Amino acid sequence: MKLVNFRFQVMAALLCFCYMYVNVIAEVKNLQSKRTYIIRMDKSNMPASFDDHLQWYDSSLKSVSESAGMLYTYNNVIHGFSTRLTPEEAESLEKQQGILSVLPEMVYELHTTRTPEFLGLGKSDAVLPEFDLVSEVVVGVLDTGVWPELKSFDDKGLGPTPSTWKGECETGKNFNSSSCNRKLIGARFFSQGYEAAFGPIDETMESKSPRDDDGHGTHTSTTAAGSAVSGASLFGYATGKARGMATQARVAAYKVCWLGGCFGSDIIAAMDKAVEDGVNVISMSIGGGLFDYYRDTVAIGAFTATAHGILVSCSAGNDGPSQGSLSNVAPWITTVGAGTLDRDFPAYVTLGNGKNYSGASLYHGNALSDSLMPLVYAGNVSNSTSGFLCMSGTLIPAKVSGKIVICDRGGNSRVEKGVEVKHAGGLGMILANTELYGEELIADSHILATAAMGQSSAAAIKNYAFSDPKPVATIASGRTRLGVEPSPVVAAFSSRGPNPVTPEVLKPDVIAPGLNILAGWTGAAGPTGLEDDSRRVTFNIISGTSMSCPHVSGLAALLKAAHSDWSPGAIRSALMTTAYTKYKNGKTILDVSTGQPSTPLDYGAGYVNPVAALDPGLVYDTTVEDYLGFLCALNYSSSQIKLATNRDFTCDPSKKYSLGDLNYPSLCGAGVTSIVKYTRTLTNVAPPATYKVSISSETPSVNILVEPQSLNFSEQYEKKSYTVTFTATSMPSGTTSFAHLEWSSRKHVVGSPIAFSWT
Ligand SMILES: *[C@@H]1O[C@H](CO)[C@@H](O)[C@H](O)[C@H]1NC(C)=O
Ligand SMILES: *[C@@H]1O[C@H](CO)[C@@H](O)[C@H](O)[C@H]1NC(C)=O
Ligand SMILES: *[C@@H]1O[C@H](CO)[C@@H](O)[C@H](O)[C@H]1NC(C)=O
Ligand SMILES: *[C@@H]1O[C@H](CO)[C@@H](O)[C@H](O)[C@H]1NC(C)=O
Ligand SMILES: *[C@@H]1O[C@H](CO)[C@@H](O)[C@H](O)[C@H]1NC(C)=O
Ligand SMILES: *[C@@H]1O[C@H](CO)[C@@H](O)[C@H](O)[C@H]1NC(C)=O
């Protein structure tokens, strides 16, 4: 049985021992042959012989297994329960009446100061929604829990919890009712699926409570809605006032991720509760395998949450720059990729030949002396073929001691390479990007003097090390630099389109800050997350789409505060149609992995622009009915639709459903024929105005016609439709063409990316 891995989408600097645990789980499974299943019940068709649905669930379960108990029952995002069964028991349960499906649980593996200003929030507080409105909004974060003592969870100035709030502060190890306050208004933990598969939690390793022993959940929740903290920094880096995107919004923490990963039965239980508790936004920096939407736990939970008016924001994944590397791609999820800020942390390598190269580091400790030290390439001082990556136990101490070692990026985590160099007696490390990572510079709080180098500098340094008979170098670091240009750029690690499940829906939706992000941290682990890192910090700087996702979750909370009647679709539309794709000089945002202009497959609609998003003019208000029509266009059967959406819906056989007609803020065609026609509907959310369309196309071989060419809105919430017809004059197969569509009034510009791939 293959385990499907769901993981936190933080870059590999952290959480390095989870892989080891995943192997352990596989062994446990083989021994006991029972595993966790999520059972979906047809609740609306309960046999009349039962008084209530729990009795019915229990009786169905008992008919196949006397001993099995329910781990959870689910009542909101799905109807049913989870339990431990043998494959034979699962098979016979599936055949019973009233059972919609019996799905094996998936194991989901572990995937600021500057950001508000860079996003334009610091400068123009005047346009932000009022304090009291924002404080009515609750962001639910599914992650590793929280470290509640941080100043980022200070509730000063906040009024009573919103009257609609029904959540709780669950207590447990190192977490009591006074851990919650008017900022952290809810905290729950979900460990039954994890413990059923893994055995009881080892309380010496992790707290069986909402307490975050890892750091990831504290970082994501404070990014979304942390209170403002003056004088924040990591070792003096990124000093300033740290604040979440929606400083006055409330946080509810749902701990679903443990040392062994994030278990599907726990995740769906947390989403079920979050809906019942009354959160307005769900933030999930968790990712995993790709499935049809009716088999994907996160997509299923997100559908019902969306139908309840909750925006679900998820990380796009860190598997870039490969094409088609996205996760969390369902059209009702807001999928967030990562870009940079205009801030970096320069470190310099000076060589014996006098050349000086610039890289990045967050190293804090004894600096290397100014004198030059011997320089070696790891691949030359190792007894292993993977030595060039500085994998654990591969460097030969006699050849490394007292030297600076060049290690290539990849294979293991960046900070682990430093551990290996230090163990072998090395004094410093140059972390060399290969072609895959281009010029992307991720700063880490390494345990020895280190400079991360872009590919071209790394190549020059290696060239020197290979050609000079006595190569020497030194490393200097310790600064924070602002106003870096060009910025933003698309992060190399940010997962890219096309959408691997439904290529007709462009993903990611947007990109947001995800590189070198400062936010709150746990007191139970050091900034590198390494077991022997004994340093403790209240803020940490880390990178990943795990970090960009909560930026968008917090911005969605601001939009919800400003426009309490907007649907999740309208909020996402506002973020997408106002996102930008060009620098002030008119050039397209670059992809740091290639140094070339990026495309909608990299950035979706573009880099978020929250101030513009507060007043978008028009929105594509994608509704639940639109999503149901989309599933009909995918030819889902009624039972598949019920599994995906938790509702009864039959596609109208007389209606022609088309994937291209999903009322989405972007337009995407895959394998298109020579003429295709899409329909879109805009809703006016601003004073009356007339909008005119314009198209900028980079591909002369595709002719794009919009009808009508102008839309005249005379009242609020008025809806108007238009069609776009694409005619290809020549179709170079295997290529993708891009264009940009804009509806502009005197005051607003409503933009949509267009992508077409020809097969
Ligand atoms: C629990 O509550 C007491 C006060 O009742 C407090 O002193 C203590 O620090 C709290 N927190 C934890 C994590 O135990
Ligand atoms: C290397 O260049 C940087 C940036 O120009 C400069 O700040 C630093 O002092 C230089 N180092 C040496 C040793 O020349
Ligand atoms: C070190 O490794 C590089 C790259 O593998 C190789 O080109 C070079 O010849 C090696 N140098 C020595 C001294 O072995
Ligand atoms: C490789 O070197 C390491 C470190 O010196 C040593 O522990 C290991 O036994 C060596 N392995 C081989 C195969 O020589
Ligand atoms: C759905 O079925 C129709 C009719 O068989 C077919 O033309 C269409 O390509 C199918 N759509 C998808 C997404 O498979
Ligand atoms: C738009 O509609 C309004 C109200 O119906 C009308 O007064 C105005 O002339 C129209 N403008 C255009 C450009 O059609």
Image (cartoon, grey):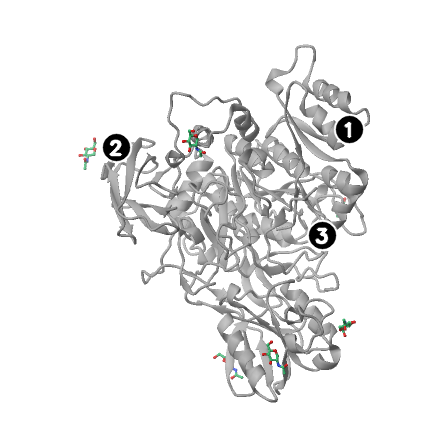
Say which residue appears at 55% left-offset and 48% top-offset: 225
Q: Circle 1 — which element?
A: loop
Q: Circle 3 — which element?
A: loop
| Residue 12 image point, x, y percent | 62, 58
Give 45 or 384, whichever is nearer the viewer.
Answer: 384
> Does label 1 point to a residue whose CB lies under 8 Å from ligand 1?
no
> Where, by quadrant of the figure, is residue 91 drawn?
top right
- Sooner in the amino-acid sequence: mark 3 or mark 2: 3
> Where, by quadrant of the figure, is residue 728 drawn?
top left
> Where, by quadrant of the figure, is residue 478 drawn?
bottom right
| Residue 573 image point, x, y percent | 41, 41
Contact (CB < 8 A) between labels 3 and 2?
Answer: no
Say which residue appears at 53% left-offset and 88% top-offset: 353
| Residue at which label 1 appears | 69
Q: Real-space Cα distance between discs 1 and 3?
A: 29 Å
Q: Is residue 113 above or below residue 349?
A: above
Is 454 positioned to the left or the right of 76 in the image?
A: left
Is 325 positioned to the left or the right of 43 in the image?
A: left
Q: Circle 2 — which element?
A: loop
| Residue at which label 3 appears | 213
Task: Check disc 1 and give the amino acid type.
Answer: Gly
Give 382 or 562, whichever is nearer the viewer.
Answer: 382
| Residue at which label 2 appears | 714
Q: Is residue 39 above or below residue 553?
A: above
Contact (CB < 8 A) between labels 2 and 1?
Answer: no
Task: Check disc 3 and give the amino acid type.
Answer: Asp
Q: Is residue 605 above or below residue 437?
A: above
> Does label 2 point to a residue whose CB lies under 8 Å from ligand 6?
yes
- Sooner in the amino-acid sequence: mark 2 or mark 1: 1
| Residue 150 image point, x, y percent | 65, 53
> Ligand 3 quadrant?
bottom right
Task: Check disc 2 and give the amino acid type.
Answer: Ser
